[in-house]
Image (tube, rainbow, N blue to C red):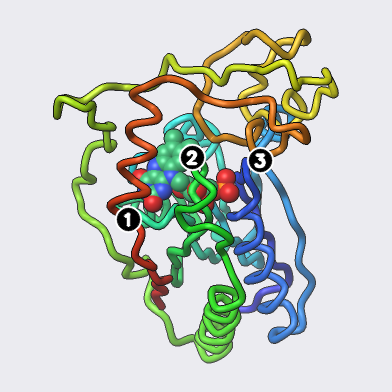
Amino acid sequence: MSISHIHTAYFSPTGTTRTICTTLAQEMSRILNIPWKLRSFTLPAERKEPLCFSGSDLVILGVPVYAGRVPNVLLKFLNGIAGNGAMGIPIVVYGNRNYDDALIELRDLMESAMIHTIGGGAFIGEHSFSRTLGGGRPDAQDLNVVRSFAGTAASAIENNRFRTPAAVKGNIPYRPYMVPQTKDGGHQKISRVFPKVSDACTNCGICAAVCPMGAIAPDYHSYTSFCIKCCACVKACPTGARYYDDETYLFHKRQLEEHFSRRAEPETFI
Ligand SMILES: Cc1cc2nc3c(=O)[nH]c(=O)nc-3n(C[C@H](O)[C@H](O)[C@H](O)COP(=O)(O)O)c2cc1C
């Protein structure tokens, strides 16, 4: 199979998925000596046009892991991809807990879109909810794994030595979306939780500009749509004015920080 372009398309509210996908595309482009392009579908305006590829494209498709799965808010957009026989590599990035069935689900979505997957990878990024869980990741060690995976994938393509659909880790049927535990051991959805805004807010508008749901109203203090807890606004706010104070959310965050402090390592599949 001959490839003429590498396309890397990603959803990345806090930037870690973008870093992994960009590094992989850049390195594969260097090794295979073919051009690469970036396409974000993070913001609502970027999801207006469907993704469309051709049989001579290699598609690196990256999403963060939400509740052990591909973020469900993306399913409609991802189901609209026209792969037209492109080759593909699914990439998931998770916050040091687990990627559960997200990688196999993304592989299947790509296959349904007529993208022939040849490999895949699960990498670690700083957890959206936290500064310490997976703090500072992906780091230099992670990016070396990405570059080495780029070499393996490029050589598999050059020598036509891969299996498709790619054999990646995960369960079929997929496990249900993970639901946070409450203090009393019950389960509670946190879908109705929104960030609060403190007096430190200067109305600069960065929060609204980075919100992947376009949910922050022009007054920057109220919401026009639901919040997916991606924390793009919390982490991008230059004065630290945005924060969550919901007890269930904070309990879940503390539990994650406590139970998943070990260093998870990237996993790659060809
Ligand atoms: C709603 C939500 C659910 C998440 N669920 C998981 C999860 O199941 N496992 C995990 O390890 N990280 C989970 N994360 C963390 C993200 O996968 C991780 O921080 C990722 O690096 C964020 O990617 P981004 O920087 O491209 O936005 C979740 C984050 C959010 C916002």
Q: Left or right: where does residue 93 sit relative to residue 30?
A: left
Q: Residues within 10 Å of mark 1 (few under 14, many from 20)?
A: some
Measured from the top left, where is residue 220 in percent x and y? 73, 14
Q: Residue at x 32, y 50 (%)?
A: 258
Q: Nearer the viewer, residue 178 or 207?
A: 207
Amino acid type, mark 1 = Phe
Mark 2: C-beta under 8 Å from nearest atom of ligand 1: yes
Mark 1: C-beta under 8 Å from nearest atom of ligand 1: yes
Q: Residue at x 82, y 18 (%)?
A: 203
How far is the residue under mark 2 from the one under mark 1?
Answer: 13 Å
Q: Mark 1 — residue? A: 260
Amino acid type, mark 3 = Phe
Q: Mark 3 — residue? A: 41
Look at the numbered disc 3 and give the secondary structure of its residue: loop
Q: Reply above or below: 161 against 201.
A: below
Q: Nearer the viewer, mark 3 or mark 1?
A: 1
Q: Reply above or below: 149 against 189.
A: below
Measured from the top left, where is residue 221 in percent x and y? 68, 10
Q: Which mark is residue 161?
A: none
Q: Residue at x 31, y 22 (%)?
A: 189
Res 265 seen here: yes
Amino acid type, mark 2 = Phe
Q: Nearer the viewer, mark 3 or mark 2?
A: 2
Q: Nearer the viewer, residue 199 or 211?
A: 199
Q: Mark 2 — residue? A: 129
Q: Residue at x 66, y 74 (%)?
A: 3
Q: Nearer the viewer, residue 149 or 123?
A: 123
Q: How many marks?
A: 3
Closer to the chain start, of discs 3 and 1, is: 3
Closer to the chain start, of discs 2 and 1, is: 2
